[in-house]
Amino acid sequence: MGQKDGFLQYNRELPQSRPPQERIKDFKEIYDEFPEKKTNEQAARCMDCGVPFCHNGCPLGNVIPEFNDAVYREQWEEAIQILSSTNNFPEFTGRICPAPCEASCVLGINKPPVAIEHIEKTIVEKAYELGYITPHVPKSRTGKKVAVIGSGPAGLAAAAQLNKAGHWVTVYERENRIGGLLRYGIPDFKLEKWVIDRRLEIMKAEGIKFEVNANVGITIPAEEINENYDAVVICAGSTLPRDLPIPGRELDGVHFAMDFLTQQNKEVAGDELCDKKISAKDKDVLVIGGGDTGSDCIGTSHRQGARSVTQIELLSKPFPNRTENDPWPLWPMTLRTSSSHEEGGQRQWAILTKEFIGNSQGQLEKARLIDIEWSIDNNGKQGFKEVPGSEREVPCQLALLAIGFLAPENKLLTAFGINTDPRGNADTKDYQTNVGHIFAAGDARRGQSLVVWAISEGREAAIAVDKYLMGESRLPSKDDSFLNVMSY
Ligand code: FAD
């Protein structure tokens, strides 16, 4: 490691964000510039810890101590080579990953962990600036054709890797733009969309084709895909939202979070909206669901000019620190405060929504809520009971359901004759479905998850497809990511 005592010399430091009241006036990313010297110091905090748990904590197997060392020595070309040996899109994960690597950083045992995610973003942005990220067209082509269905991070990673292996790849996307939830779920204030476009230009120059407005199984029959391609990778995401079937669900003003977020992203992109706009302006907004999607609804509601924003969650308030149930290096199940939470609104836990109440025109006016108490029975099963006398009505003219996703849409899987697991996800063995030439990756296979997992699955599925087509694969697997770096 570059500086042996760096972790003693420097404290963890991250870029400042713009003041909340200023940044909610626009949809731009929120972080200020950070001097390069400070990033070198942050990289110097990486210890010579011997067994880098961060490497294992990352679903991609990112070789973190090695790129930290290169950043400390200001060797940006070496740093991007190490980083891109395991991650096709560090510009996405460097912005929006919850960073499981940092949760398992050895320094994190008794000090704030190394700022790995920030270092990752800096490496990739510096590499673009210095011209180190350029298209790499494969030297030879295998003549095999692969269709990737769905253009989220899983589909893009699978496409990039399969193209690298020399196959001709076409990505099909039913939306009018490429990117999946990166494009139409995650708000611009977390990930500006030029970041996706910049990467797409590289991928197109490398020979990957993209077909938009192509709804496979609906506007493009599965038979056509089967006839024209040697293999197919389904990366269609987990898009069926969980509903809340309580009285009043049909009222005007109760919406799925994704309908709200997608519209806003489309508006920022300058797209025309097909449906009536769901707006938070001058409304009391109730966000139901305490996760990331709910948090994105809060940030978007504030930017649209909501009168008030309240987020409610069924589960109890998490602890501020790790407990004996989630010791280091496990992912901490602690209270998280996102940048959207910093911008205002209220958060409440252990609350059940009983009913939506509307006026005579069918418009939402109020929600009826009740407090609940969680307990564990003698068999270890968790359950809750309502707290008598805690029932109340709260004003709300917009309610956003952000309570998760169930599975991929069944029509696509049925069109290809693919078996599903008990949760409705594509059932696979080593990413291969029951239909030999069809593979699946990302949220469509593992259920709703994270961008970093989607990229990891896309890369691993590409290896399985390559082996199926060629009998063997030289594409790198996350299991030997460390060895690949050592061979530079
Ligand atoms: P997706 O990104 O869902 O992409 C699937 C694509 O397939 C979509 O574009 C869809 O239109 C397309 N498709 C579906 N059916 C068809 C068809 N029949 N024909 C053609 N195309 C089709 N994760 C993080 O790590 N950090 C975050 O900050 C974060 N924030 C999130 C915020 C929100 C609001 C949501 C909903 C999720 C968030 N996630 C986040 C999770 C993350 O976005 C997903 O885990 C990830 O995008 C899954 O990638 P994927 O490629 O499997 O699927």
Image: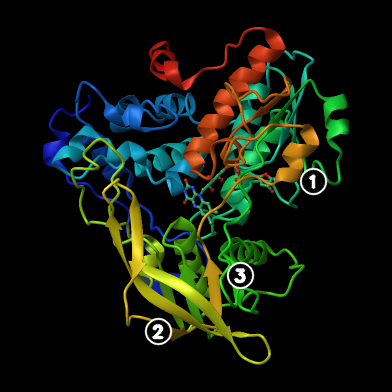
Q: Is mark 1 within 8 Å of ligand 1?
A: yes
Q: Quadrant of residue 31?
A: bottom left
Mark 3 = which residue? 255
Are circles 3 and 1 on residues that touch, CB within 8 Å?
Answer: no
Identify the residue at horizontal 46%, vertical 24% (top origin): 81
Are circles 3 and 2 on residues that touch, CB within 8 Å?
Answer: no
Q: Nearer the viewer, residue 317 or 387?
A: 387
Cα–Cα span, label 3 and label 1: 24 Å
Type of amino acid under label 3: His
Q: How many marks?
A: 3
The percent position of residue 418, horizontal first and vertical second, equals 72, 32
Q: Is residue 47 left or right of residue 393?
A: left
The percent position of residue 253, horizontal first and vertical second, equals 61, 78
Quadrant including the C terminus: top left
Q: Work out which residue is located at the far front of the displayed protein and give it.
A: 378
Q: Nearer the viewer, residue 34 or 263?
A: 263
The percent position of residue 111, horizontal first and vertical second, equals 15, 43
Mark 2 = which residue? 392
- Point out which mark residue 215 bears: 1
Identify the residue at horizontal 53%, vertical 86% (top origin): 282
Q: Secondary structure at mark 1?
A: loop
Are circles 1 and 2 on residues that touch, CB within 8 Å?
Answer: no
Identify the residue at horizontal 33%, vertical 54% (top origin): 15
Q: Secondary structure at mark 2?
A: strand
Cα–Cα span, label 3 and label 2: 21 Å
> Around disc 1, counting alpha carbons within 10 Å, would you say few (fewer than 14), some (14 to 19), or many (20 or more)?
some
Q: Does residue 136 lie above or below 408 as drawn?
A: above
Cα–Cα span, label 1 and label 2: 44 Å
Compare marks 3 and 2 and give the one earlier in the sequence.
3
